Image (cartoon, grey):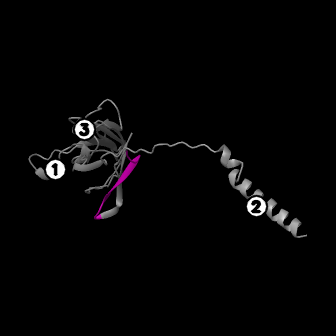
């Protein structure tokens, strides 16, 4: 019996030695590896600064039909339609000059960007909030791309000028007031 036990112990020892020389799993004999790269490009963030507000000036609504005042980006004058007319203020500086809103856009030189505006805004008289005028057809044009609406490209220094215009709708029998609205201007890299 002793000899059988010794033979069994020798067989187990031989099996342990052989097992140590063979891979412990079939999968490890089939593994492969490679290395990849991770990269990122960090650009200057976009910034937009208001340098002037959209101003439709002082408007007189003559008649029952109502009218509109259109101020286009980079235009030299407003277009009046219907019964809306520019009020004759003489030399009164409080009358208000007609001009598009203007903004300075800065960011990564040479990068293209897009401008997002709301479809319309509601201008209210703070002294009488029930009075409201719609500002519609809001449009943005960049100095770098005056032939395209809502897009631009930053110059070599990383800046561009942007103007926003729109159309003020003056309903019939609008009461006198000083109407204002806020418009969100969102700019993203293209």
Q: Residue at x 91, y 70 (%)?
A: 1
Q: Nearer the viewer, residue 67 or 19?
A: 19
Left or right: where does residue 63 sit relative to residue 20? left
Location of mark 2 (residue): 13
Q: Is residue 131 visible?
A: yes
Location of mark 3 (residue): 78
Q: Examine the rendered structure and indicate whether residue 101 appears above or below residue 141.
A: below
Residue 24, by quadrant, is: bottom right
Q: Magenta residues, as a range?
A: 116-127
Marked residue nearer the N-terminal end (3 or 1): 3
Residue 51 screen position, x and y as percent: 20, 48
- Identity of the residue furthest to the right in this view: 1
Disc marking residue 95: 1
Q: Is residue 83 visible?
A: no
Q: Examine the rendered structure and indicate whether residue 156 appears above or below residue 14.
A: above
Residue 38, by quadrant, is: top left
Callout 3 environment at 10 Å: few (<14), some (14 to 19), or many (20+)?
Answer: some
Q: Residue at x 35, y 52 (%)?
A: 184
Disc marking residue 144: none
Q: Secondary structure at mark 3?
A: loop
82 is within the stretch colored magenta? no
Q: Nearer the viewer, residue 7 or 185?
A: 7
Callout 1 environment at 10 Å: few (<14), some (14 to 19), or many (20+)?
Answer: some
Residue 64 screen position, x and y as percent: 34, 45
Q: Nearer the viewer, mark 2 or mark 3?
A: 2
Distance from disc 2 to disc 1, alpha carbons, whole Å, reads 106 Å
Marked residue nearer the N-terminal end (2 or 3): 2
Left or right: where does residue 89 sit relative to residue 73? left
């Amino acid at each position: 019996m002793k000899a059988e036990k010794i033979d069994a112990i020798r067989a187990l020892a031989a099996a342990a030695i052989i097992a140590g020389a063979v891979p412990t799993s079939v999968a490890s004999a089939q593994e492969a590896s490679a290395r990849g790269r991770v990269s990122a490009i960090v650009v200057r963030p976009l910034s937009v600064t208001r340098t002037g507000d959209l101003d439709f000036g002082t408007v007189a609504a003559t008649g029952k039909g109502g009218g509109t005042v259109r101020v286009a980006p980079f235009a030299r004058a407003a277009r009046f339609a219907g019964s809306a007319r520019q009020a004759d203020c003489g030399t009164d500086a409080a009358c208000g000059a007609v001009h598009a809103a203007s903004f300075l856009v800065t960011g990564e030189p040479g990068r293209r960007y897009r401008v997002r505006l709301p479809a319309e805004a509601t201008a209210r008289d703070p002294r009488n909030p029930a009075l409201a005028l719609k500002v519609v057809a809001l449009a943005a044009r960049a100095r770098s791309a005056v032939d395209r609406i809502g897009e631009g490209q930053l110059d070599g220094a990383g800046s561009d000028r942007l103007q926003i215009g729109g159309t003020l709708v003056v309903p019939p029998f609008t009461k006198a007031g000083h109407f204002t609205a806020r418009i969100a201007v969102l700019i993203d890299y293209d």
